[in-house]
Structure formats: C-alpha cells, structure tokens
Image (tube, rainbow, N blue to C red):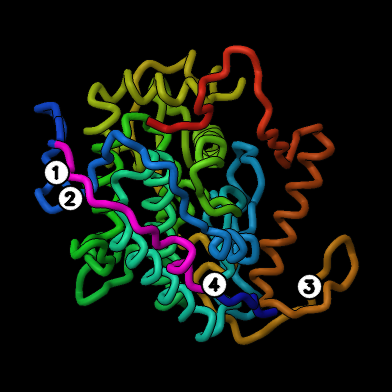
Amino acid sequence: MTTQFLFRSVAAAALLSLGSVAAPSLAQSAAMPQVQAQFVQFVPAHNGKPHRIDYSIWDEALKNLVISMGPSMRKSAASRTPSIGTRRIYGHRSRYRLEGSRIMFSFLEADVTQTFTEYRKDLEQTGTNLDLQSLPRNEQLAFWLNLHNVAMIEQIALAWPIRQPRDIKIGGVNLDDAKFITVNGVAMSPKDIRTQIVYPNWKDPLVIYGFWRGDIGGPSIQREAYNGENLGDLLDKGASELVNSLRGTQKNGSTLLVSTIYSEAAPFYFQDFSRDVRNHIAEYSNADLQEILSKTEDAKASISEPDIADLAGGHRESTANQYETNGLANGFRIPPSMARLLAERERKYDLLIRQGVRTGTVTFSNIDLPGDPEVKTEIE
C-alpha cells in the first residue's frame, strides 16, 4: 500500500500583502529563560489583523498519514517474543505501543517524502512574507505548530528506517536542535519554535500538546491540521489523551510520575513543578487519574519512550503477510510485525467497545451558548 497525495503550494493562498508592525518589547519574568534577540520579532502584536492561512493541503495529508491507536487503557501492552528461528524482535516492543497515534512512514516513497520538504519551504516562505506577528494569536500559534510538525515529519521520513528520532542528525546536530528551518531570515530548530517562540508568548500550557516529537512518548499528532478555529478543540483533545495515558502519568508510591515533556516546559508553566504540573493535569484527568492524584503528593518527570511513532517500529522487514480485518482479507500485504500491531489494536478497540468506552469524538461547532466568550477557542 502506498499513501498517495500531492501538495499544492500554499503560498498563493497564504501570502497576504500586510504592512509591517514593529514588534513590542518582550516582557519576561526573572525566572523565565531569556529569549534570544533574533526571536523577539515573532512576539505577537496586539492588533490581530483578521487574516487566515489555508492549511487544507496539510489537513488532507494528515488524514492519509495518521492512524490513531485509540484511548489508553492504562495497561502495559504484552511483551513481544522473537520470531520463530531468530532472536530478533521486529516491530514495536514498547509497553506503550497501543497508545497515541502513528505515522505510516514505511509506506512513503521518495516522491511523497519530497513533498514534505516542498511544503515545509512553502510554510517558511509564508511566514517570511506575511506580517506574521500581526495575525490573530490563534492563527500565529497554528502556523508555528504546523511548521514544527511538518518539519519533524519531513526529517523523520528522510531518515527512515530509524528506530528513534533522537538519533537523527542534520549536519552533525541532533534533529531537535538542528537549525534547518528559516523564517524571515531567522534560522531555527524545532526546539527553538517551542522554547523561543511559543512557550514564552502563550501563557496556557495547553500549547505543549500541539508539538509532535516523532516518538511514542510525546503528544499524539492529530489527523487534522491546526487552524485558528479548531486550535482549542484539538489541543484539548491532545491534552486529555496524553494526561490520561500510561505514557503520560503513572503512580509510584506517593509520587505521581509524569512524562518528561513537562520538564522542558517547566520554566514557562510549572515553576513550582510538583504543585503546578499536578494542578494542570487535574484539569484534564478522568476518574482513574483523579484517584491517582488523590493518593499521591509529589510529582516527578521520569516517563519517556523514545521509540519512533510509526507502524513498523523503524524496521524494514523483507517478508509480508496478507492483512485481515474482521477475518476478511484487506487486499494488501504488510510486514508480520505490523500485522501483529494492527491486530493488537483491533482487539483493543473490540474490548473498549464491549466495555462501553467511547472510541471516537463528536465535535459541535458554530453553536452559541449563553455566557460563551466572544472568541471561544482562543489560546492565550
């Protein structure tokens, strides 16, 4: 099976003729990390010109690329055993392999991977030609989230097969720190987008869940592109999924163990780490997690899973099996390890349905209720 999609350039739809606005001075607390001078130009202005960027091409791509593993059951996946006649275990071995979402990197051909590079450059050009900081805040945030995630997917696709994205290097520099993205003359890394642009300028820690890191341990990538209207709903969805998952939170005696993604964001959102991160997690916790919170007092960021968030575990197998769904041949052949993972996923969904757990979401939009704010999904 080959994922087929082509990107049109977003430049024609997105490049708007806007006047330049001088960036305001960046107010920071003494405890917050210092933002480097070249990033001050990306501080949001206050006028919020009512313009939008069209991400329909990326939206279509994500719907073809992303597979959700469904809501967490807060149970470790069963241990994997080696294939017959070998000690090697192909595919995913992680205890968290049935959580989060997956990108189908193993099905991407070179011409499709090239479109990621083209689209990333289109977004860079859009950010360069727009008066980006004068757009509505949600539009700005959607731009940075999409650019970050496009760049991560592009580089992982170029490097695949690879078991852990943190092993990818660009010019000898680790992927997360490599400055291969350029907007308005400023070279930046994925980490720069998070810690130099978004975290210092958006006060709601919900933004953490919009950044896809390429590994199983981080927030899920959504099957929709972010835009100014869906931003709040998608970030809420991402927060609830990770917070209530086993890779997000666990109990260890009287300590709440949390994902290491909170460590990076701590100087911006969780300066009193234990108190602040517990309060944040409580906002999105389900009944099971609320019970864990009630039985713990401290918090420690120690949960991680660096394995790649794909279907094949970063391996290319030489054999393939017929894949079946509900006992019927699906019409294409996939590696045995991937077939096992998808079969595990199917059994998980069957169990969730039997338990009465809702496995999908229903979104209502354009519905006004008494007391609703003027901009209902704005992330500040």
Question: Where is residue 158 drawn, in percent x and y?
Answer: 42, 78
Q: Secondary structure at mark 2?
A: helix
Q: Position of residue 222 (x, y in %)?
A: 56, 51
Taking the image as drawn, is residue 92 in sight?
no
Secondary element under disc 3, as helix, strand or loop, is: strand
Q: Tag 2: residue type?
A: Phe
Q: Which mark is residue 39?
A: 2
Q: Which residue is mark 4?
A: 105
Circle 4 — which element?
A: helix
Image location (x, y in percent) of residue 81: 61, 64
Q: Is residue 282 left or right of residue 91?
A: left
Q: CA distance from mark 4 to mark 3?
A: 18 Å
As shown in the figure, which amino acid type bears the numbered disc 3?
Tyr
**Residue placed under numbered mark 3 in the picture:** 323
Mark 4–mark 1 Cα distance, whole angstroms, equals 34 Å
State the CA–CA distance, disc 2 to disc 3.
49 Å
Which residue is label 1 attached to? 35
CA separation in Å, label 1 and label 3:
50 Å
> Considering the image in quadrants, where does the C terminus appear?
top left
- Of labels 1 and 3, earlier in sequence is 1
